[in-house]
Image (spheres, rainbow, N blue to C red):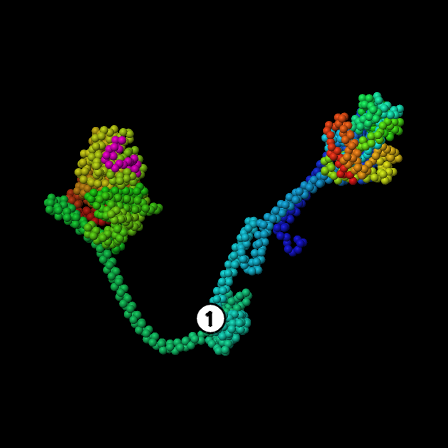
């Protein structure tokens, strides 16, 4: 099972699982990519079997014909996604007329939409500059932009450089969700591997909670942090365990609401041509 | 076979062995496939890894030149490829620049990358070479490819090399391949197993079950000695064959057992039922078996004595000595016996009795046994004693009787001798009677001939009507008497075994000619049609007795005429059987007479029998004819027979097996001379019509036939109109309606483009008919039945002539133009006799010879010729071969037997140009040979060669035959001139006769004993072996 992933704290438990030996290379191979665009492209090209992504990325892939199913929620952004602005800009309202770098992704749109709503601004009121979040630091330092829509770990790094958190996902709870999505055909073909994959995540999560020090040591190199910093990376991220997942993913649950909202938004923005039903997107059977 | 003593059954072993072999093969092939697949995979993976590494290396080089900044992204995407487990970019210092694992960035490669081989890395970096390392298990490949790090530093120290490291993990693919191969293998194994099961089932049903049945049957057979029912013949061919053979074998064995049992039962029955006592003892003379008769004899129960010694029954002191030497005797054969010996038996009640014993020894299953057969002879001994007493008294009586008998015997022998003598005498008498009759034939016939001959002469020399009547009656009676005498004499000869058949070459045609000559007159007198039909394959020349053959045929013919009042007599000759050197001819004479009943037929051919006495009275005859015919036919290797029904006529036939003459030719020459001539046969009698037509066709003519005068006229007219006129029309004389003469007259009057030549065929030979025929414009009149040879002669002559009535009828009789040349030859005067039954031929010969200055006399047949030769001397005789009454050969022989004819030159004239004919002629005494039609030149030269001037006038006659002939003539006539003539010819005579004979001849002349001289001359002249039979 090839799982495409990018560097994001919510996703790192899979790597932790690998380091812990819970995920053998025979069952799951983690393909470390640099951007979610690469991730989506490889998924579209059929070179990946599963990926870690945001819900909107999953839905966008669905819209492009990749039949993905969400099998687990990895994290819920509660501050991990943020709009960071250079010093001086304190509130969302101050963003009017400013240059805002935003990834041309659903999640970027969602955050942008949220911050603009909060500031009662319209899209036309700001200057949108496309970028990819991995370049957050460079772009910020180039001073070509006034604000960036980005997420951890760059949020923390940008704060260290003096950027100001103007708006974050705590204001849109459960809106930004990272999930593990698997191709539908593999669910049928290799259910055991899928189960193992999902279980590995929760095991690693459990391990992190029980022995954060050791876990942090293992996770640090990938996050390019010193182990002491690792805990900070999870700021703003809620990490639901298996039980929470069940609660979240049940029909009519909170995730369902997010899904419908998101779908509506994406339809409006033309990011999706065709609606999908919640049942067709979510498959909680593999949760341990 | 560790499973125990019982080996695997075929049914199990064969499929298992096959399965094992197949499985091994499959596994081997699978292993091979896996190995190959892995090798392919490895090669492919290496290529992929190399190309990936190279791609990254290039990307890294570009990045180092600042051309692109997507290196990191490219690397991670590259790392997403299947199998690629690790991609790392390592700078010259050995630090990981980029890696598929973000965590390794900036780390020392040797520390983070598993199994990192620093030496290898150094080699790659230093030598700028690629390295490919394969893990020992073949599942991991590491490719290390160098790249140029063109950093700012690089400008100072030229080039620094980094390396791209790519790890490939093929575990999954290898396992997949293995998994697929295993699945494939399992499937194949499964299929093989199914096939094997099928095979096993087939083996079971076709081989092992039949074999098991066979096994069971053989076990049953071994246990019980029989098989209740035959094994079904089923399964594969060999197995079925085995079953069949087994069945056959068991059937045979069972049959043999039954036979054996039957045989044993028979033997037992024989032994049990034997009236003689039979006791079998072993070497120690212990009783093994005793039959009921013996038990009764000794008054023992059989069970009591078995196992006891023989002395219980036969006291040892009476045993013959031979019994005690068993071994040698027994060794000699399976059953060596001794003769009959008288022994004494002991009954259970102690009574002794005499018994005849015979002993036979036998060896059964290695044991010597002795069978003693005993017969109680108490009664016989008593009887013998009584006999002996009786014998003593009898002996005397017997002696007496024997003496009496010897006496009687002597008397009988004497009587027998007398009887034998009487029988011999009787037989002698009978033989003498036969001999007498046979010998008397000549004596009886000669006066009869004289009577007949004299009567004939007397008839010719008187005109007195009463005398003629007497003489005719004498002639009739004497002929009749002669016939009877001939029959009786012939029969006597046959009975006396005095008749022997000649073996000479003869012509069947001649025999048939004689037959027709003799029979046709009588047939014609009764108005009967005589038809002769000879099959084409009948050879003309055969070896046998023509006279006797003719006799049988004439007998049948005369009978047919005698018993037929109206209708026809049909004589046919055919070949019944062909052998290499013999031919069996069948002669049949069919009449339309009174016929015969079955009883009459049965009595025919018996001596002194006629159909019935009444016919005998009515038709006369001795009744010997058919008996003679039968005997003659039998002597000729044939048989006789008759097919008849009363009122429907009879067919008398006989066969004769005749030797083929060495130069046998068919009687009728077929196709040898094809003449393009059309013939029309006109006859109201169907048989005659048919026979004549076939005869003509065999001669090569195109013949048609019609059945009456009117039809003939129409046919002739039509043929003339169609420009295919008939060359010859053969008309029967007697026909209802328009008869032959009338038809001829009408034909002559017709205005035809080419009038046919007309031939009249008649049963009558009278002058009146011939005269009428000539008057009607008929060229030739022929007499029935037609002789093929004669007919051919006539037709050939006729076809060479111009038909009469066409204006110059005289030309036919005038000699051909060649005569002019013949005239130029020197003329020799003399008298020539031309003999031919054909008027035209005679005329031609006469004219030709007249032209050469000869006087010519003519004769119609041999007998006339003979007469003329006797009456006057001729210088030459031209003799036709085939003639009625007497043919040329017979006439020649007759002439040669006469004194005046011995030296007469005779030249044959014949249409038969065969060498055979020439030889026949010369054998008969002819001097030369002329073929018909006569060539004037040849005739002239032949005549010139043979005709000499008159002998008396010539001093030098030159030719001894002529001299001799003349001399004989003079002596015969008693002419005194002969003495002077002999003196003139003495040198020639001396040369011919030799000196002693000439002296004797002159001596006779001196004594005027002309008869003696003639005798001497003839003796000297007669060729050896031609004894004149006067």
Does the image show residue B866?
no
Q: Residue furthest front?
A: A252
Q: Quadrant of residue B231?
A: bottom right
Q: Quadrant of residue B978?
A: top left
Q: Where is residue B200 drawn, in percent x and y? A: 61, 48
For the residue pair B890 and B926, the one nearer the viewer reads as B890
Q: Where is residue B808 drawn, in percent x and y? A: 21, 29
Does the image show residue A218?
yes
**Residue B515 horizontal side relative to residue B264, left or right:** left
The kind of secondary structure element at disc 1 is loop
Image point (18%, 34%), residue name: B775
Q: Confirm whether the magenta stretch covers residue B708.
A: yes
Q: Where is residue B180 drawn, in percent x and y? A: 70, 40
Relative height, residue B994 to residue A282 (above, below): below
Chain name for mark 1: B
Q: Confirm whether the magenta stretch covers residue B603.
A: no
Q: Where is residue B576 drawn, in percent x and y? A: 32, 46
For the residue pair A223 and B55, the one nearer the viewer reads as A223
Relative height, residue B54 to residue B207 (above, below): above
For the residue pair B18 and A96, the one nearer the viewer reads as A96
Magenta stretch bounds: B695-718
Q: Which residue is mark 1?
A: B276
């Amino acid at each position: 099972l090839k799982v495409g992933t990018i560097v994001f704290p919510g996703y790192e438990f899979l790597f932790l699982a690998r380091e812990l030996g819970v995920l053998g290379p025979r069952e799951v191979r983690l393909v470390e990519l640099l951007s979610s665009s690469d991730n989506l492209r490889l998924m579209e090209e059929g070179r990946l079997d599963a990926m870690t992504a945001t819900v909107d990325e999953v839905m966008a892939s669905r819209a492009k014909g990749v039949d993905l199913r969400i099998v687990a929620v990895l994290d819920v952004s509660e501050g991990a996604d943020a709009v960071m602005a250079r010093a001086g800009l304190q509130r969302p309202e101050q963003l009017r007329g400013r240059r805002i770098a935003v990834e041309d992704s659903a999640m970027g749109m969602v955050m942008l939409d949220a911050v603009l709503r909060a500031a009662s601004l319209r899209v036309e009121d700001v200057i949108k500059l496309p970028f990819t979040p991995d370049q957050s630091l460079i772009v910020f330092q180039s001073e070509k932009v006034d604000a960036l829509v980005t997420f951890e770990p760059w949020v923390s790094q940008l704060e260290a450089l003096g950027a100001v958190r103007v708006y974050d996902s705590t204001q849109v709870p459960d809106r930004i969700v990272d999930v593990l999505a698997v191709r539908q055909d593999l669910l049928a073909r290799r259910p055991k591997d899928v189960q193992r994959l999902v279980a590995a995540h929760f095991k690693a999560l459990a391990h992190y909670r029980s022995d954060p020090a050791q876990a942090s040591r293992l996770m640090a190199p990938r996050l390019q942090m010193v182990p002491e910093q690792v805990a900070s990376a999870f700021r703003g991220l809620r990490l639901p365990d298996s039980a929470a997942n069940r609660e979240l993913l049940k029909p009519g649950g909170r995730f369902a609401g997010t899904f419908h909202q998101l779908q509506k938004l994406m339809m409006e923005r033309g990011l999706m041509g065709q609606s999908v039903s919640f049942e067709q997107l979510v498959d909680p059977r593999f949760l341990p | 076979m560790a499973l125990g003593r019982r080996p695997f059954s075929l049914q199990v072993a064969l499929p298992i062995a096959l399965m094992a072999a197949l499985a091994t093969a499959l596994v081997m092939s699978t292993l091979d496939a896996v190995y190959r697949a892995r090798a392919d995979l490895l090669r492919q993976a290496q290529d992929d890894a190399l190309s990936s590494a190279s791609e990254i290396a290039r990307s890294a080089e570009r990045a180092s030149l600042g051309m692109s900044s997507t290196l990191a992204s490219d690397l991670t995407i590259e790392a997403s490829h299947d199998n690629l487990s690790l991609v790392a970019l390592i700078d010259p210092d050995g630090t990981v620049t980029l890696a598929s694992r973000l965590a390794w960035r900036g780390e020392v490669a040797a520390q983070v990358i598993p199994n990192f081989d620093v030496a290898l890395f150094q080699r790659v970096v230093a030598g700028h070479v690629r390295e490919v390392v394969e893990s020992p298990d073949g599942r991991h490949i590491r490719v290390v490819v160098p790249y140029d790090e063109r950093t700012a530093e690089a400008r100072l120290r030229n080039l620094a090399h980094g390396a791209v490291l790519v790890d490939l993990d093929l575990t999954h693919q290898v396992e997949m391949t293995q998994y697929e191969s295993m699945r494939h293998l399992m499937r194949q194994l499964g299929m093989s197993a199914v096939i094997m099961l099928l095979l096993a089932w087939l083996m079971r049903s076709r081989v092992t079950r039949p074999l098991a049945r066979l096994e069971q049957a053989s076990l049953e057979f071994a246990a019980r000695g029989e098989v209740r029912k035959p094994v079904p013949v089923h399964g594969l061919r060999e197995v079925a064959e085995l079953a069949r053979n087994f069945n056959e074998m068991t059937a045979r064995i069972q049959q043999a057992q039954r036979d054996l049992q039957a045989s044993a039962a028979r033997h037992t029955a024989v032994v049990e039922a034997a009236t003689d006592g039979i006791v079998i003892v072993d070497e120690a003379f212990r009783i093994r078996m005793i039959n009921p008769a013996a038990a009764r004899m000794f008054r023992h129960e059989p069970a009591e004595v078995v196992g006891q010694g023989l002395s219980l029954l036969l006291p040892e002191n009476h045993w013959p000595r031979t019994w005690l030497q068993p071994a040698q005797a027994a060794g000699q054969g399976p059953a060596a016996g001794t003769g009959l010996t008288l022994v004494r038996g002991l009954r259970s009640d102690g009574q002794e009795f005499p018994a005849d014993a015979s002993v036979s020894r036998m060896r059964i299953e290695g044991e010597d046994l002795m069978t003693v057969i005993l017969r109680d002879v108490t009664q016989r001994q008593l009887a013998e004693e009584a006999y002996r007493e009786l014998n003593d008294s009898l002996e005397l009586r017997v002696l007496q009787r024997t003496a009496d008998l010897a006496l009687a015997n002597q008397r009988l022998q004497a009587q027998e001798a007398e009887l034998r003598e009487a029988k011999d005498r009787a037989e002698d008498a009978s033989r003498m009677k036969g001999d007498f009759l046979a010998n008397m034939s000549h004596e009886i016939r000669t006066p009869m001939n004289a009577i007949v001959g004299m009567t004939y002469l007397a008839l010719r020399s008187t005109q007195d009507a009463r005398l003629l009547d007497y003489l005719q009656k004498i002639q009739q009676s004497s002929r009749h008497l002669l016939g009877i005498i001939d029959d009786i004499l012939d029969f006597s000869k046959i009975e006396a075994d005095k008749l022997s058949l000649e073996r000479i070459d003869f012509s069947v045609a001649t025999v048939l000619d004689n037959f027709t000559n003799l029979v046709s007159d009588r047939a014609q007198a009764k108005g009967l049609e005589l038809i002769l039909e000879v099959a084409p394959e009948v050879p003309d020349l055969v070896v046998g007795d023509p006279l006797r053959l003719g006799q049988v045929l004439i007998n049948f013919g005369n009978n047919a005429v005698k018993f037929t009042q109206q209708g026809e007599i049909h004589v046919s000759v055919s070949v019944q059987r062909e052998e290499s050197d013999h031919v069996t001819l069948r002669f049949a004479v069919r009449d339309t007479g009174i016929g015969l009943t079955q009883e009459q037929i049965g009595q025919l051919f018996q001596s002194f029998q006629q159909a019935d006495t009444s016919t005998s009275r009515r038709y006369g005859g001795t009744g010997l004819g058919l008996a003679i015919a039968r005997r003659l036919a039998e002597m000729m290797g044939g048989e006789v027979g008759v097919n008849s029904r009363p009122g429907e006529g009879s067919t008398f036939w006989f066969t004769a097996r005749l030797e083929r003459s060495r130069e046998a030719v068919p009687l009728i020459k077929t196709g040898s001379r094809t003449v393009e001539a059309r013939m029309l046969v006109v006859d109201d009698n169907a048989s005659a019509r048919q026979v004549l037509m076939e005869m003509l066709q065999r001669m090569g003519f195109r013949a048609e036939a019609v059945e009456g005068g009117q039809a003939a006229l129409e046919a002739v007219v039509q043929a003339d109109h169609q420009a295919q006129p008939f060359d010859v029309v053969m008309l029967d004389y007697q026909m209802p309606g328009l008869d032959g003469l009338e038809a001829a007259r009408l034909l002559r009057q017709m205005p035809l483009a080419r009038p046919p030549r007309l031939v009249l065929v008649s049963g009558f030979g009278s002058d009146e008919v011939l005269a009428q025929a000539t008057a009607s414009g008929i060229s030739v009149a022929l007499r029935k039945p037609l002789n093929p040879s004669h007919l051919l002669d006539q037709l050939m002559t006729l076809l060479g002539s111009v038909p009469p009535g066409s204006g110059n009828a005289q030309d036919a009789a005038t000699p051909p133009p060649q005569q002019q040349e013949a005239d130029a030859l020197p003329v020799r005067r003399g008298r020539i006799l031309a003999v031919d039954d054909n008027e035209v031929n005679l005329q031609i010969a006469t004219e030709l010879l007249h032209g050469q200055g000869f006087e010519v006399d003519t004769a119609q047949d041999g007998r006339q010729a003979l007469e003329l030769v006797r009456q006057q001397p001729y210088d030459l005789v031209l003799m036709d071969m085939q003639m009625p009454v007497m043919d040329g050969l017979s006439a020649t022989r007759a002439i040669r037997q006469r004194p005046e004819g011995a030296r007469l030159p005779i030249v044959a004239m014949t249409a038969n140009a065969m060498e055979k004919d020439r030889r026949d002629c010369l054998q008969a005494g002819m001097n030369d040979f002329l073929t018909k039609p006569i060539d004037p030149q040849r005739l002239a030269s032949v005549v010139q060669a043979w005709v000499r001037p008159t002998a008396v006038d010539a001093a030098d006659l030159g030719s001894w035959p002529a001299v001799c002939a003349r001399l004989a003539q003079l002596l015969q006539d008693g002419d005194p001139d002969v003495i002077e003539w002999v003196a003139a010819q003495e040198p020639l005579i001396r040369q011919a006769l030799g000196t002693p004979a000439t002296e004797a001849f002159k001596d006779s002349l001196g004594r005027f004993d002309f008869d003696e001289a003639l005798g001497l001359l003839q003796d000297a002249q007669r060729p050896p072996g031609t004894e004149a039979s006067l």
